[in-house]
Image: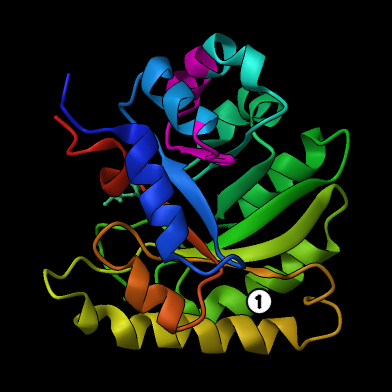
């Protein structure tokens, strides 16, 4: 247990962020009870990183099904696609044509997806390289069963989030370029970037979805 008041943290965060910005609760390692507390306070989107972990919590939180959407925000392995599809409303982590095709093949209804961009080209991070993002967007747009609705990034971590600003700015340019393309942009509306220590800068630079764990649920143990 920590002495964090989850409901209060969520409301304070919600009040401090413009209405057009969607808050995702990044809930890896958090229990179903902790997540329920946030949903009851108004949190409308749950972001999970692992299919297995999400499966258990999704079942435990069945009674909140009408109150919260679930987004996959971690790397999706192709052998987990079948399990992931019924759990998640949106998959934010498309980073290769192979993964996109795998989902396309198994989709029964159109699956909303985001492309994950490795904006700083870090070895340690998943995501498509910035220069290859437009092309992956074209490939995704041509596949049946997928609908490209957003771009997502995990920026490099800096203690001073101002240092992440150039990466957020680059994401926004990429996002606008794709959104202005007639084929790619049809459903492209969401720019998912910014975490606990960086969401203010990300919103400044155009994020309309932020993924926040620590500021709502406290430090992860
Ligand atoms: C954990 C996580 C976050 C949130 O991290 P915090 O620093 O706890 O806010 C956001 N996005 C992804 C993909 C994550 O895995």
As drawn, is 17 to the left or to the right of 99? left
The magenta stretch is 41-57
Coloured how? Answer: rainbow
Q: Is mark 1 within 8 Å of ligand 1?
A: no
Q: Tag 1, which secondary structure?
A: helix
As drawn, is 122 to the left or to the right of 12? left
Instruction: Say which of 15 and 208 sits in front.
Output: 15
Quarter of the image with the C terminus in it: top left
Residue 74 appears in the rendering:
no
Tell me residue 83's x, y (percent).
Answer: 62, 22
Q: In this view, does 88 lie above or below 155?
A: above
Tell me which corner region of the image, top left, top right, bottom left or bottom right, holds residue 158: bottom left
Instruction: Name the residue at 88% across, 52% down.
Output: 144
Instruction: Name the residue at 52% across, 31% down.
Output: 39
80 within the magenta span: no
Instruction: Name the residue at 53% across, 28% down.
Output: 40
For label 1, count other residues whose C-alpha is less than 10 Å away and answer few (under 14), some (14-19) or many (20+). some
Residue receiving disc 1? 135
Residue 133 appears in the rendering:
yes
56 within the magenta span: yes
So how many labels did they put on this image?
A: 1
Instruction: Say which of 86 and 9 sits in front.
Output: 9
Quarter of the image with the N terminus in it: top left
Tell me residue 36's x, y (percent).
Answer: 48, 22
Tell me residue 46's x, y (percent).
Answer: 52, 37
Instruction: Name the residue at 44% across, 75% down.
Output: 203
Tell me residue 74's x, y (percent).
Answer: 44, 43
Q: In this view, does 22 lie above or below 107?
A: below
Tell me which corner region of the image, top left, top right, bottom left or bottom right, holds residue 191: bottom right
């Amino acid at each position: 247990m920590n002495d964090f008041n989850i409901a209060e943290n969520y409301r304070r965060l919600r009040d401090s962020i413009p209405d057009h910005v969607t808050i995702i609760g990044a809930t890896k390692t958090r229990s179903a009870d902790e997540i329920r507390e946030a949903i009851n306070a108004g949190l409308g989107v749950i972001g999970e990183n692992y299919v297995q972990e999400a499966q258990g919590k999704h079942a435990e939180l069945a009674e909140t099904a009408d109150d919260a959407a679930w987004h996959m925000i971690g790397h999706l392995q192709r052998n987990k696609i079948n399990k992931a599809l019924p759990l998640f409303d949106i998959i934010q982590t498309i980073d290769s044509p192979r993964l996109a095709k795998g989902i396309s093949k198994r989709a029964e209804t159109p699956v909303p997806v985001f492309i994950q961009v490795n904006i700083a080209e870090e070895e340690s991070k998943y995501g498509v390289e910035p220069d290859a993002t437009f092309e992956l967007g074209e490939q995704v747009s041509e596949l049946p069963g997928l609908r490209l609705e957003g771009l997502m990034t995990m920026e490099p971590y800096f203690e001073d989030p101002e240092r992440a600003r150039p990466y957020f700015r680059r994401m926004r340019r990429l996002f606008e370029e794709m959104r202005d393309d007639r084929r790619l942009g049809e459903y492209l509306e969401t720019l998912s970037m910014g975490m606990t220590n960086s969401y203010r800068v990300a919103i400044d630079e155009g994020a309309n979805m932020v993924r926040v764990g620590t500021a709502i649920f406290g430090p992860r143990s």
